[in-house]
């Protein structure tokens, strides 16, 4: 049987809540279609009971493709205020060219 | 002792062969089932789009003909398509395209007067009739008033159809039945002269609207190639040789080496087998994708046209990229290119429904901003976990003008002689992100003899660089070439491809001849 090589890039997700109720999801590593379900699992309970503000801290995220963006967008549909903190220039530009800078507010 | 071991090997290998064949057949049935289930959206979405269009236009027969007409007629998807008023006492079609529907009055009344309507495609077998076929009915869910669309496709009279010998499934015989059982009266199509299937077989039931399809497959020859079928005898023969050699020479080393060689040989064969299966899976993905995408004519309204879809280099999955290029009259051409986030069958079937919905909205009002706005409402009305980037461009061929709107999609490239530049347009949010998203249009003049190339991000995106780097690379690669449009569109994805490419690519080029 074809045993196709499937390299799943490393991904670390940490969640914490600030005293003002803002939820911060710290996403490190690389995020693509191979491991995006890990992030989806983390955000599903968040969408069910949305905080006033949710921050994706992407300072440690080296790569993200459209599958990752899809999860961020899905969260933005349910949570009023979604921010993306310290994304790399590559990710900033990706959010920009996909017309999402109004939906995912970038904070440096 | 060696001979006993050899005999044991023969039995084990034969058993392994049996198990392997059974497992492979189950896998193949599942794959063929996936291909079949992908046939549902291409049936449902034109009907759903036509019903939505009829509801929006108060049942305008001309709009219905414009949308459904190209798919109806001998050799096309449907033999007959008709538009019906829901909940009316007079059960008669408003308009019929192609053959008259073979729908008895009692059944029509049941279909078109009931109020509680499930949100599925109704599938009705007409298998005992003189020209056997399947009927499909769709109306917008929850609508007691409004319109329903009914269409029929015909089946070959003898129900025989062969899988083409060059497809990925040419090693299988199959039979497809309507319903949840392999009932000979409900046979839709088969590749076999004689039924039922005897011997090794596998079955699979696939949901089909409010009905189901049952698929039975049987291998034409050994699925794993002759090597595995012959393995018991190869092992037996070599085992005997090895035993004799051991008994005669008692050189353990020699025996060990021979076994190692045999093992190494087997590994090579297994690697070759893996390679073959991988290629085959890729073949399935490509066949399926091609079935979901349109054939583009080489010329439309005096504009040269070429389009291509390339699956991801590293994957065996289908993707969510699509395109359409259609003439809308008055020497105008509508170009649509889009990309549904994610991969696999779900992305591909979502793509199929977005593709048809876009065409339906364009038939209603072809302004690109209006099309994107309606498409966005359509997606946001339901639960969804994807988004799609879409570029919609109305090309006025005569006046060298393009009016376009972008839902998060990359801008098209213009090639004007030695010069290459990307159209400067406002990028609005992708489809499926937000309700009531506004879409803006830009209207841009294109120089004489210029080429416009629209594409999806798979053509330019690479890990570790900004998208601008990729855009510059594309522009350079495209302007360096002195090629015909066909060759350019065929060559660019190859030139820009790289190893381990995870994304699929769609590319569409149009070229003015004056």
Image (cartoon, grey):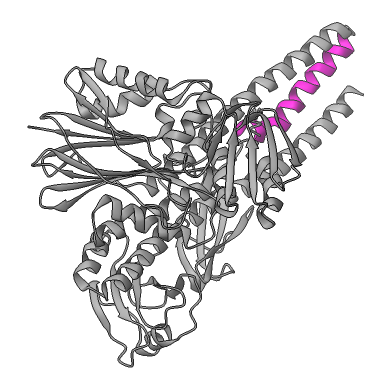
Q: Name the residue furthest bottom.
A: B89
- In the drawing, does residue B212 fall left or right of residue B231? left
Quadrant housing residue B12: top right
**Viewer-proximal residue, B303 or A25?**
A25
Magenta residues: mostly which secondary structure? helix
| Residue B152 visible somewhere in the drawing | no
**Viewer-proximal residue, B66 or A82?**
A82
Q: Is A69 drawn above or below residue B38 in the view shown?
A: above
In percent of the image, x 48 and y 35: which residue is there?
Answer: A95
Whether B253 is among the magenta residues is no
Q: Is A9 drawn above or below residue B117 in the view shown?
A: above
Residue B236, given in percent of the width and then of the height, sits at 76, 27
In percent of the image, x 47 and y 29: which residue is there?
Answer: A93
Residue A83, given in percent of the width and then of the height, sits at 58, 40
In percent of the image, x 58 and y 48: which residue is there?
Answer: A81
- In the drawing, does residue A45 fall left or right of residue B312? right
Quadrant housing residue B97: bottom left
Total labels: the figure holds 0
**Viewer-proximal residue, B263 or B366?**
B366
Q: Quadrant of the N terminus of chain B?
A: top right
Residue B436, given in percent of the width and then of the height, sits at 41, 57
Residue B216, given in percent of the width and then of the height, sits at 57, 58
Q: Is B81 drawn above or below residue A1 in the view shown?
A: below
| Residue B446 visible somewhere in the drawing | yes
Give the magenta range: B225-249
Q: Quadrant of the C terminus of chain B?
A: top left
Whether B227 is among the magenta residues is yes
Q: Name the residue furthest front.
A: A20
- In the drawing, does residue B253 fall left or right of residue A47? right
Q: Is A105 drawn above or below residue B7 in the view shown?
A: below
């Amino acid at each position: 049987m074809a045993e196709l090589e499937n390299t799943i890039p490393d991904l670390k997700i940490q969640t914490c809540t600030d005293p003002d109720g803002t939820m911060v999801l710290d996403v490190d590593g690389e995020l693509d279609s191979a491991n995006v379900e890990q992030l989806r699992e983390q955000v599903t309970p968040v969408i069910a009971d949305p905080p006033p503000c949710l921050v994706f801290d992407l300072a440690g995220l080296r790569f993200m493709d459209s599958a990752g963006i899809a999860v961020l967008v899905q969260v933005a549909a349910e949570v009023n205020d979604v921010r993306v903190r310290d994304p790399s220039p590559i990710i900033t530009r990706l959010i920009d060219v996909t017309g999402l800078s109004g939906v995912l507010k970038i904070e440096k | 002792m060696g001979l006993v071991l050899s005999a044991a090997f023969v039995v084990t290998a034969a058993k392994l062969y049996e198990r392997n064949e059974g497992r492979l057949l189950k896998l193949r049935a599942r794959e063929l089932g996936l291909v079949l289930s992908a046939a549902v959206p291409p049936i449902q979405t034109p009907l759903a789009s036509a019903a939505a269009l009829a509801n929006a236009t108060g049942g305008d027969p001309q709009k219905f003909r414009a949308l459904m007409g190209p798919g109806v007629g001998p050799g096309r998807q449907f033999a007959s398509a008709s538009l019906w008023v829901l909940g009316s006492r007079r059960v008669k079609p408003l308009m019929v395209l192609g053959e008259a529907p073979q729908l008895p009055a009692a059944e029509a009344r049941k279909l078109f007067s009931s109020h509680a309507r499930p949100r599925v495609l109704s599938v009705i077998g007409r298998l005992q009739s003189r020209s056997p076929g399947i009927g499909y009915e769709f109306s917008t869910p929850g609508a007691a008033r409004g319109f329903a669309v009914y269409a029929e496709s015909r089946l070959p009279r003898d129900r025989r159809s062969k899988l083409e010998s060059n497809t990925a499934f040419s090693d299988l015989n199959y039979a497809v039945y309507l319903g949840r059982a392999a009932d000979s009266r409900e046979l839709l199509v088969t590749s076999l002269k004689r039924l039922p299937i005897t011997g090794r077989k596998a079955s699979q039931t696939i949901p089909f609207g409010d009905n189901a399809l049952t698929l039975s497959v049987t291998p034409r020859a050994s699925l794993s190639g002759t090597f595995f079928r012959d393995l018991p005898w190869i092992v037996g023969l070599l085992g005997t040789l090895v035993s004799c050699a051991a008994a005669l020479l008692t050189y353990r080393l020699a025996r060990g080496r021979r076994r190692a060689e045999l093992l190494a040989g087997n590994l090579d064969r297994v690697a070759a087998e893996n390679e073959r299966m991988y290629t085959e899976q890729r073949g399935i993905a490509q066949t399926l994708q091609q079935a979901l995408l349109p054939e583009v004519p080489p010329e439309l309204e005096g504009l040269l046209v070429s389009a291509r879809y390339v699956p991801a280099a590293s994957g065996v999955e289908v993707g969510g990229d699509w395109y359409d290029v259609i003439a809308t009259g008055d020497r105008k051409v509508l170009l649509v290119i889009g990309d549904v986030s994610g991969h696999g069958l779900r992305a591909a079937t979502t793509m199929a429904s977005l593709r048809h919905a876009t065409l339906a909205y364009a038939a209603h009002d072809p302004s690109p901003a209006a099309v994107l706005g309606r498409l966005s409402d359509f997606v946001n009305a339901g639960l969804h976990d994807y988004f799609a980037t879409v570029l919609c461009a109305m090309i006025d061929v005569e006046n060298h003008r393009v009016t376009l709107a972008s839902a998060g999609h990359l801008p098209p490239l213009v090639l004007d002689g030695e010069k290459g530049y990307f159209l400067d347009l406002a990028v609005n949010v992708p489809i499926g992100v937000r309700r009531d998203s506004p879409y803006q249009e830009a209207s841009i003049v294109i120089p004489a003899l210029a080429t416009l190339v629209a594409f999806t991000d798979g053509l330019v995106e690479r890990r570790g660089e900004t998208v601008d780097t990729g855009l510059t690379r594309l522009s350079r690669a495209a302007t360096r070439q002195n090629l015909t449009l066909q060759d350019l569109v065929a060559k660019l994805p190859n030139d820009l491809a790289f190893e381990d490419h995870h994304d699929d690519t769609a590319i569409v080029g149009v070229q003015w001849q004056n």
